[in-house]
Image (cartoon, coloured by chain):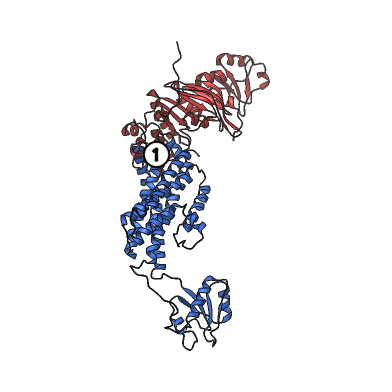
Chain colours: A red, B blue
Amino acid sequence: MTEPQPILEVKNLRKVYKTIVAVDDVSLKVHPGTCLGLLGPNGAGKTTTIEILEDIFEPTAGTIHYKGQPRRGSFREEVGIQFQHTSLLNYLTVKETLRTFICLYGDPEEFDTLVQRCELGPLLQRRNNKLSGGQQQRLMLALALVNRPSLIFLDEPSTGLDPQSRRNLWQIVDQIKAEGKTIILTTHSMEEAEYLCDEVAIMDKGRIIAEGSPEALIKQYCGSSAILLPLSVDTRKLENLPYLWQQQKDQIRIDSDDIYTTIAALSTLNIDLSGMSISSANLEDVFLQLTGRQLRD
Amino acid sequence: MKLQRIWALFLARNLEFFRDKAAFGWNFAFPFLIIVGFGFMFEGRNHQQFKVGLFPVAAEELTFADTTLPRSFQTEERVQFIPLPGRHSGEELLRHHKIELLVDVYSADHAYWVNDSSPTGYIAEKLYLASFLPENSQVANKKIIEGEEIRYIDWFFPGLIGMNMMFSALWGVGYVVVRYRKNGALKRLKATPLTPLEYLCAQTLSRIFLLMFTTAVVWLGSDLIFDFNIQGSLWLIFFLFFLGGLCLCSLGLILAARGTSEEFTSGVLNFISWPMMFLSEVWFSLEGSPEWIRSVSQLFPLTHMLAAIRKVMNEGATLIDVGGQCLFLAAFTAAALIIAAGMFSWND
């Protein structure tokens, strides 16, 4: 069976600012109808990468193919973009802003559809500078959908939002996904990536250091689960345990593919299991495993 | 180029301007206050007044009884008399150019003091000396110019409106575009099919619409106060304001094409606007100034705009008479728009 043609294919992408290499040899494929998340610590090159893919910045080297062809002038007619940092005309209302952007495209979405999808109905007469963070993000998302895009870029869409607004935004994005649209998003939030993304690419220092589905990455880098023991456990006994373990700040962690066998091994070594708990590994564990736990500037 | 996109942005920018009450109010208040202020300063006083210190005269009793001051000098309307207690205080004022001439009003030999480094002092001295000539003596043949009088305000007013247009166009376009670039608004527009030329045309048209609107309101208000004497067509005057405004907006777009720092852009805008204000005959005529200054002034669009408007307003010139200036302004606008579109960057 042949692999379907990717909607976006990037090869050996590189971006250099004077002496700083922001993006270094990034290659990836995005298939139609999937959601790809670019994850990474601050300064990893996520935003630079996504803005090159959006055709906002030119790469120093590398190729980008959209639907099998180099991007053309019509690219901006067909993709939707939500930036991390942007601004709108302060004194315009939500309704006027949407109408203005609708006029910029040849085949725009219906005004009412946009309003309904992004839940902007009660906000139509409100000025842009009077919107809360979550309301602004919903408006920005609506603007990204104005041209009925087949490919949507979302750069940290939920940064700075409270939990309710974040959940609300995820639900809207989930509905967009359900319509078969392709999404590329960057995020700091592992919870967001696990909720929305079919595939993730973890970036660090301008390079992609791991990619795959969240489940596959968790399995590959953290095992499926972890047994957590209190620090009071006699660690000398653990020396004989046939599994990898690590002493963390407030607990001892044992990553394991088979919880029952591991517990049996711990019992055999007469280790006190009274304070034991079991934790399923998640994407954050993968992220920390790959990018380290040191504070990044 | 799609007109629909230009129209959408034109409307959006205008809505923003009219809703920003502070900016909106200031765009009317500033030119109106300047015009009314300067208008009243110069109205009915088309000449300079010279300050002449008189001593020894008590501040509260400035009378000329028993003084040796010539009668014709006492009634000279170009002179403002300043009473002074003594010579010493008068000399201090003269040294610091606060008065042009100092006269001892009881001196039998009409003693006076003047600061030789003061050009206005030289004129005041000549006025004083001329007042000693017999009243009916005729040393030259005086003729009065014929025709309707052109008051100073009639000459000065287009300059003030032009100056306001220049600042509003350069800052309203140049500074605003840089601000939009810095806050990411331009980046958002770059993600749409909008082209730089479409965006720049929308910005220019929006600003010229606002400029013409404010100019019309300020003109109407000022005309009610000063009753301007207009020799030519008012429509032609407004057409020239339109053409000049477009030209100034286009110049603002070049300055804003790449700037990312509001501070740097302010500096560049000042660097352009201040010489243009002084060399484009806003405040005074360059008649008699060195040739190179007049040559430099011809580079500025404001010079051509004001020259054409004054020709129409003060001399009754027609469109054909000001065709050269119109061509210059139109060509400058087209060239500036093309250059700005070529240089334009959406990103910071």
Give the labeled residue for mark 1: B198
Q: Nearer the viewer, residue B183 or A40?
A: B183
Vertical comparison of A291 with A259: above or below: below
For label 1, the crowd category at 10 Å Cα-Cα, with few meaning under 14, some 14 to 19 and many 20 or more, is many
Q: Amino acid at mark 1?
A: Glu
Q: Quadrant of residue B118?
A: bottom right
Q: Nearer the viewer, residue A269 or B236?
A: B236
Q: Is residue A240 left or right of residue A199?
A: right
**Residue A262 x/y as whole percent:** 59, 15
Vertical comparison of A270 with A46: above or below: above
Q: Nearer the viewer, residue B81 or B45?
A: B45
**Residue A105 x/y as whole percent:** 36, 33
Total marks placed = 1
Quadrant into which the N terminus of chain A falls = top left
Q: Nearer the viewer, residue B210 or B152?
A: B152
**Residue B149 x/y as whole percent:** 35, 68
Q: Secondary structure at mark 1?
A: helix
**Residue B12 x/y as whole percent:** 36, 43
Residue shown at the point (35%, 35%) measured from the top left? A102
Quadrant into which the C terminus of chain A falls = top right
Name the residue furthest top: A1
Name the residue furthest right: A236
* Pointer 1 chain: B
Residue shown at the point (57%, 17%) measured from the top left? A256
Q: Is residue A278 visible?
A: no
Q: Is residue B194 visible?
A: yes
Vertical comparison of B244 with A51: above or below: below
Q: Quadrant of residue B334?
A: top left
Q: Is residue B166 left or right of residue A208?
A: left
